[in-house]
Image: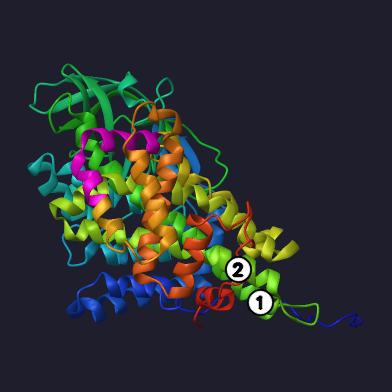
Amino acid sequence: MARTTHTVTNQTPPLVGYDVFAADRVLTAAVERHTAPELLDEVRGELSVLGQAAGSAQVQEWGAQANDHPPGLRTHDRYGRRIDEVEFHPAWHRLLGKGVGAGLTSAWNRPAGHVRRAAGFLVWTQVEAGNCCPLSMTHAAVPALRADPALAAEWEPRLASTVYDRELRPAHLKAGAVFGMGMTEKQGGSDVRANTTAAHPLAEDGTYALTGHKWFCSAPMSDGFLVLAQAPGGLTCFLVPRVLADGTRNVFLLQRLKDKLGNRSNASAEVEFDGTWARRVGDEGDGVRTIIGMVAATRLDCVLGSAGLMRQAVAQAVHHAAHREAFGGKLFDQPLMRNVLADLALESEAATTLALRLAAAYDDGGEQELAFLRLAVPAAKYWVTKRCTPVTVEAAECLGGNGYVEESGLPRLVRESPLNSVWEGAGNIQALDALRALRREPAALNAFLVEVGRVRGADHRLDGAMKNLLTEFADLEGIEGRARRLVERMALVLQGALLVQHAPPAVADAFCASRLGGDWGAAFGTLPPSLDLTSIAERARPAL
């Protein structure tokens, strides 16, 4: 019999067997704030079911399995025929099926659809972020498809379906479908107008044959893809079905899968088109204008995804500190650790609050709210996604050496954390997009100023930041070189205004003092000690 050499003590229990939604005070408050009272019980119940699944040991294990077993590419079958298929671990399909079943591809036609879906997306990201990519693109394809009412009528019910059907067969034979997207090419990157893929008209009106490539095609196992190509009339948006109506497979040549830093469960491919059949979406030459609705929706999902990663990282850090003892007491009660946790909690709360506010603007759909989104989405996408990496890294450090070990789950969050800043237009693209809105769309700036102006006079540091921002807006000459600085300030002012309006006073005070008032260091854990750090950190603790 082996001799016992020690007893395991002072190890934090796993954060498992809980409702990820209900345990998040900030998220539940945001859902209550942005949901009509008559819908609230229904929405809470729906999100709680998803939250319980996300917090279960079984689903968390699926997330680990999907990450540990990346997809593989099969270009040919055993007989040498080209099949171009991507093989996934069964856990991937289980996760994607649950996400589809929870309505994470269905928001556009449901009451409070965007808020409930945004909250669900934020919850589900905390399980495993890779499967959220096809969920995002399937949801986001709807506004682009609506440029062609006939295509929208055909495809939208499939995309909004709560049935996940993984088989490759004609879409009209399936109860549900998922979508991918391919815009970037080797020579162009974010400059999609430099695309070289050619679209040649076929005899049937609105149909084309595509020849060219895509350097990044997300979720290549999908049933359909929105792509950009050069038609005779200019850059145009096209729908490329994976399987044609007669059951034959479209020409969709998967050259290789990308070996990525994170997001490893999700496939990203290089694709060649060689006479590939496609259906035009919108008019020739209107490709960017047509697909921009999809891009805006996926950019919001980048904000939600980063908010979800931050929330899970902070939840793990606070949970660890609440159980782990060091130097004669709980880590949570040590003043310096409490400062770090409170600082991280502020970043997470600001991200969640802003993300749900943007989702609510989609639900409203009014002219002013849409104008607000035009400026707020690129600003939020720029800033929130950039805050994700330092938050996850600092949260991992809160667990010490345990946080550097794969079993803790924190390394997966760290590797995933830069992705949303790169996907759907990196930081410079977001900053330049915000500048375009400032220069060309006065209604967007007006809507932004109305939003932050709701709390004018409530906090002197916020008032000062607003005043400085107005000075920046008044001088747009030579602004491009300082666009990042301007957009960062816009995001911070917007977050501050929302927290002053909706968060507990301790949270709003700490955010304004540090992020807007300058009473802050260059690293987390440098908040003014006079603040109510205990209540801020406790608010971020999962309410088990």
Horizontal side of 335 relative to 155 (left or right) equals: right
Residue 327 image point, x, y percent: 81, 77
Q: What amino acid is found at the position of numbered circle 1 in the picture?
A: Phe
What residue do we see at 27% from left, 62% from top?
Answer: 454
User: Label for residue 332?
Assistant: 1
Assign the magenta stretch its main secondary structure.
helix
Q: Nearer the viewer, residue 198 or 528?
A: 528
Q: Is residue 538 magenta?
A: no
- Asked if residue 77 shows in the view, the reply is no
Per the image, label 1 sits on a secondary structure element best described as: helix
Q: What amino acid is found at the position of numbered circle 2 in the picture?
A: Leu
Horizontal side of 354 relative to 143 (left or right) equals: right
What residue do we see at 41% from left, 52% from top?
Answer: 465
Image marks 1 and 2: residues in contact by CB distance under 8 Å: yes
| Res 499 → quadrant | bottom left
What residue do we see at 55% from left, 70% from top?
Answer: 315
Per the image, label 2 sits on a secondary structure element best described as: helix
Residue 262 image point, x, y percent: 55, 47
| Res 334 → quadrant | bottom right
- Residue on which the image places disc 2: 341
Horizontal side of 135 relative to 150 (left or right) equals: right
| Range of magenta residues | 429-448
Looking at the rendered image, the quarter that the N terminus falls into is bottom right
